[in-house]
Amino acid sequence: MTDSRKDVQTTLFGKTITRRRLVQTAAVAGAAASTAFHAPAVLGQEKAKVTFWTTHTDVGFDSLKTITDMFNAQSQDATVEIVQRPAADVEDSSGLITAVRGGSGPDVYLLDRFIVAERAGQGLLQDISSLASDNGLDPSLDGVYIAFASAEAHFNDGLFALPFDTDLRALYYNKKLLTDAGIDLEAWDPKNGVLTWDAVKEAAAKLDVKDGDSFSTVGFVPYYNQGWHYTYGFSWGGEFFDYDKCEVTPDNPKVLEAMQWVYDYTKGEGADAMYAFIQGAMRPGAPPNESPWNQNRLAINLTGDWEIANIPKYNPDLDYGITYLPVPTDGMDSTTWAGGWSMVIPQGAKEPEAAFKFMQYACGADGQRQYTKDTSHIPTLLEVQKDKTLYDERHLFFIDELLATAKNRPPLPVGAKYWAEMTSAWEKIYLNLADPATAMGEAKKNTQADLDSGGFCPIAKPAS
């Protein structure tokens, strides 16, 4: 996490600060907020009031509310209020940024972990290293949280987040739809190995049903749910960042091969008709009951471990299977990737000490156990992750078979920018509006410009 360019400048709320001062500024701001606003809870005094914001919905929000209630029930000096913010794309922190600039931000925010470095570099987050030390937690997080989650929580030697959960992607399939189409499910059983993407494509074509020019049932939409650029790029063996060159690589040859496969797939199906079928279910915050997967109109779904918790609620009679992510060439090893969320303290938080106590509880054993039970996500806390009683048989497949194969998005100080640029390119590719080389070339140019102008290079490769 070492960065030798300490004189690079960062703009925060219209003011320019040096990166040398970034950690110091965060610490001072946290101390000032503490002095000005925090009254220690002693006998006869009111508890500190902590505001916690999240964009989570549905099952995830319900679990976070339970964890908040659990914390409040046992806390002697703080009360946390959870606030559900409007659903947004994972890289979109505009609501938080606006609130912090206006002095009305929360004390705790649930932030997608892969963009912690970028938000820390922008001066939006407080360095919580000293708060961790004061509360008996080594700021390195070594040996406490899974390594990639710990790496994502740090920036420039500072700790800016506590890892909350992680998740993994797999291929889900509707057994009845496949069987009714005459597909032998033996090959889909993970005990019998890994499917190829072309085998999935061939099977999916048998499930497509059109009513006029429109699909009423579709076998597979390759870009729906967790069908992201990273999903395919990693599957083909591609890499998205070259640490030696300090260069984003959405134009990596293997990544482009993967993008071309999806381009050809949607072109063969009819890109416009496929998008018309799925677009309603793709908008941020779309109700799960609007998903054609839950309506039994989509047979094959790239999704994550959380789907295990969603299916009993939204499609309880579904007979489904889970298998490895496919591979482009028979005999290759399957690869998945891990995401996950974290808790952070934004600049201007009025109760940073109490906020950290809540974070430590929610991201600790009690909070992570509850979230795992409620949502079928995976704990980042190593001691909890090892507890096999938290997982049913389907969930154990993710722990026992997939976790060891997981890659993660490079934790870059332009992580949100990179995601947004690649997603824009990805949309052009699967809608057949641009060829992969052109679309990803533009994403590279735009992201690398921010990386270079920010003075972030070189970037140390995270320890594995």
Image (cartoon, grey):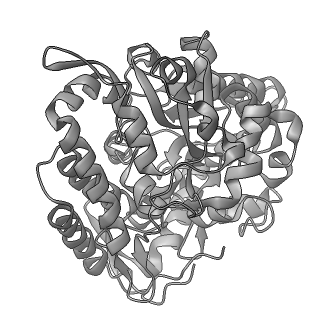
* Residue 140 x %, y %: 71, 70
Which one is nearer the viewer's eye here, 314 or 6? Answer: 314
- Report the residue that reaches farthest toward the top: 317
Which one is nearer the viewer's eye here, 455 or 16? Answer: 455
Residue at point 38% right, 40% down?
202
Would you place residue 416 above or below residue 202 in this image? Answer: below
Is residue 404 found left or right of 246 in the rendered image?
Answer: right
Q: Is residue 154 visible?
A: yes
* Residue 201 x %, y %: 38, 41
| Image quadrant where one finds the N terminus | bottom right
Residue at point 57% right, 58% down?
335
Would you place residue 247 above or below residue 343 in this image? Answer: below
Which one is nearer the viewer's eye here, 257 or 275? Answer: 257
Which one is nearer the viewer's eye here, 431 or 85? Answer: 431
How many callouts does the rendering have?
A: 0
| Image quadrant where one finds the C terminus | bottom right
* Residue 164 x %, y %: 65, 46
- Quadrant in which residue 239 is drawn: bottom left
- Quadrant in which residue 105 is drawn: top left
Q: Is residue 13 visible?
A: no
Is residue 424 found left or right of 42 in the rendered image?
Answer: left
Residue at point 61% right, 48% down?
352
- Quadrant in which residue 306 is drawn: top right
Is residue 34 found left or right of 219 in the rendered image?
Answer: right
